Amino acid sequence: MVSCFGLQHTSSQYVPVIAPRTKTLTRTGSQDNIRFELANVLYNLAAMYSQIALSSNRSTSDGLKTACNHFCSAAGVISHLKTVVIPDMRTSAPEDMDSMTMEAIEHLMLAQAQECFWQKAVKDGLKDASIAKLAAKVSDFYNDASDFGIKSDAVSSEWIHHMNAKHHHFAAAAQYRAACDCLEKRKYGEEVARLQDSLTCANEALKESRYVNKAVQADLNGLKNKVQEDLKRAEKDNDMIYLIPVPSKSELKTLDRANMVAAKVPKEVEEPMNMLGERGELGRPLFVKLVPYSVHVAASIYSDRRDRLVNEKVIQELQVLDGRIHELMNSLNLPGSLQALEKPLGLPPGLASHAEDIRQQNGIHRLHAAISDTEKVKSSDQQTYREGVDLLRAEAAEDEAARKKFGTQTWTRLPSNQAMPKLYAQVTEIEGYLKQAGNSDKLVQRKLKETESLIRLLGGTDRDLEDFVPSSRRATMTAKVERDANNLRSILNDLSRMEIRRKRKIEALRAKAKSDDVHHDLLQEAARLEREYPMQTIEAVQFEDFFDKRLRMYSADQKDVQSEEADQDELLSRLQNANEALNTARKGDSSTKEREQALQKLENAYLTYKEIIGNLDTGRKFYNDLAAIATRFRDECRTFVYQRRAEASQLEGDISTSMAQMSLKSANSVNLRHQKQQETMQGRSDPRNGGGTPLVAPTPTRSNMGPPPPIAAATAAADTHAHAGGVWTPEMGIKFGGQGAPNANGSR
């Protein structure tokens, strides 16, 4: 078995691969069609199924089942592609996706799936009749694939020969197994006929042996040899013993077929939408939260406003109310004074509960670990911020140096702080954040330093706490004192329940805000705006009315704050009156003074511990949020500095080029001026200008060299004649500067 096809797909281009081994069609194509993209994906999926089938271990029964299932899945994907996707493309399909090619590939996949069943039947030792039926159907699948391949323009001839060889191979195997069944049933004449047909089919398959691998060739040759041996034996036995007429091929009964496979479309392909969703096997769609940019911006704005409203208008207000309760109770020395009165010996239940809470949270170690983690994030933020600032300072120094070098008239670009004022404004803004956060960190550390010993004590053992809290003698409890103490305890319990209720409200409100997903409603609002204003671009500002309407869902929470404040004021007023009444009733009793002070210190230390925990959580969240701001600031600085340096390099190059051109122009001007001066001086001495002494013409003179002896006399005569007549001859030679030229009268 071999993998019949694959598809190399990149972006919207494809390279069809329906050829043996390395031969591929060189044509490529591309379309702006999402259905074409889907077709390519499914084509690749079918190829992947066939590759997985080939990689299965077909030497075992489980491996054969796995391979068969994957071949059927490959055929199912091709069938779905052929019947559903390609007709919906609304464009002409590529040649390797036409109907004939799809049919050829589908039947080839089914042939290989049926072949897996045949292999398993042989391995399991089934009867020859059953194996013959399976092999006959394998042969039919290969024959159909070959017929469709002939009608296709995409399937190469090599593949057609390959499928034809497999068709004859399994036809031969089917007839051989049928012959074995005839021998078992003592149908000796039919046995000979089927062996003869098997040998013919084997010979036909061997004609195509160059198109199959060596393993198939060896199997064919082995089958042929076995058929020849059995045919020789059967003919001899029939001729010598049985004497049964051998029917012709046309008289043989057509072998029955056992079709064990069918194209199986995977449910992920056939019903993909049912596989998606919160409860689907594939989970949520990949881009389910992908929205238009304007909707994304609007969602971010809404989230910011919602969080600001929830935190500032509700949660912080409730926390301020809790703070007022603790301040008042601390000023009234509560609940320490009441605890000392109620339980003069041992640890009060409230204090024991606080101590257990700190022990479970690992108390002081948790605080130091949180401070250490916060410091790490803070240090990272500061380093990121300093990187951005250092980049800006380095670039500003480079710009200033260039301005001094070339001058302000030449270096005309804006200074760095004027070129990007928003970026420089962030320097001051982030620095302010860091200073403010640093002051808050110091305050938290000071609180921890002041109460660390008491927090350690609360996180210790009960014995340590009992040693710290002094015992007192039992105070005299009159009826009035007991009544006032019970009243005060009742009010304190009401305040405690109020604080617990507020914590639950805050948790519920945070959960409500977290689950407030506005994307779906924003998409509907954006669609409405597009319908009403089709020619207008959707901007975030158009969602203002939607924001106001949506944020009204938190109006009830804001009203609850006002109700909580009114209820608290009433309770605090009652608390003050009850505490005053108790102090009046106990006037003059100082037996529990020291115990009250110790219990109150521990109570305040516990409240400080909870406050520090909250501050550290807030600080860690602040620095985590600041990390994103500092990172974005540093990246913007890098981009700005890179652009400025590129701009400076280009400007410096332009200035250098301009200065070089100016120098060249100046040099040319000097040369031209000097040349003009020379021309002016020459013009003054030119006789054609009518001024100055005329130039003396060169005077030809005789050479001092003597002529050759044979012509000396002739030369002398010629000289005499020349001097006499003033006629120059070549033999005279030329000599300049000796004498003046003769004038018009012949005188020198």
Image (tube, rainbow, N blue to C red):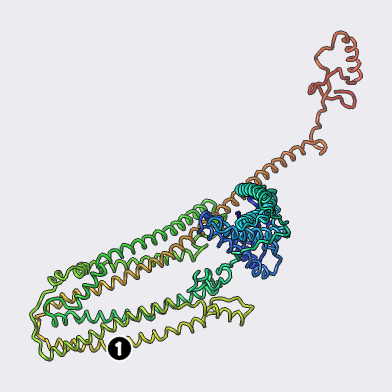
List x then y, in percent, for residue 289.
Answer: 52, 72
Q: Is residue 26 above or below residue 619?
A: above
Q: Element type at marker 1?
A: helix
Q: Is 279 left or right of 92, judged from the image as shown? A: left
For residue 735, say whether it is visible: yes
List x then y, in percent, for residue 499.
Answer: 29, 81
> Residue 190 or 73: which is nearer the viewer?
190
> Residue 274 or 441: which is nearer the viewer?
274
For residue 25, say whether it is visible: no
Location of the C terminus (image quadrant): top right
Q: Is residue 688 above or below residue 361?
A: above
Q: Residue furthest top?
A: 709
> Residue 589 or 164: which is nearer the viewer?
164
Q: Is 398 left or right of 485, judged from the image as shown? A: right
Please name the amino acid that badge 1 sits on.
Asp
Q: Is residue 653 above or below residue 676?
A: below
Label 1: how many residues lie within 10 Å, few (<14), some (14-19) or many (20+)?
few
* The image quarter in which residue 628 lies: bottom left
Q: Is residue 117 above or below residue 484?
A: above
Q: Which residue is mark 1?
A: 567
List x then y, in percent, for residue 125.
Answer: 54, 56
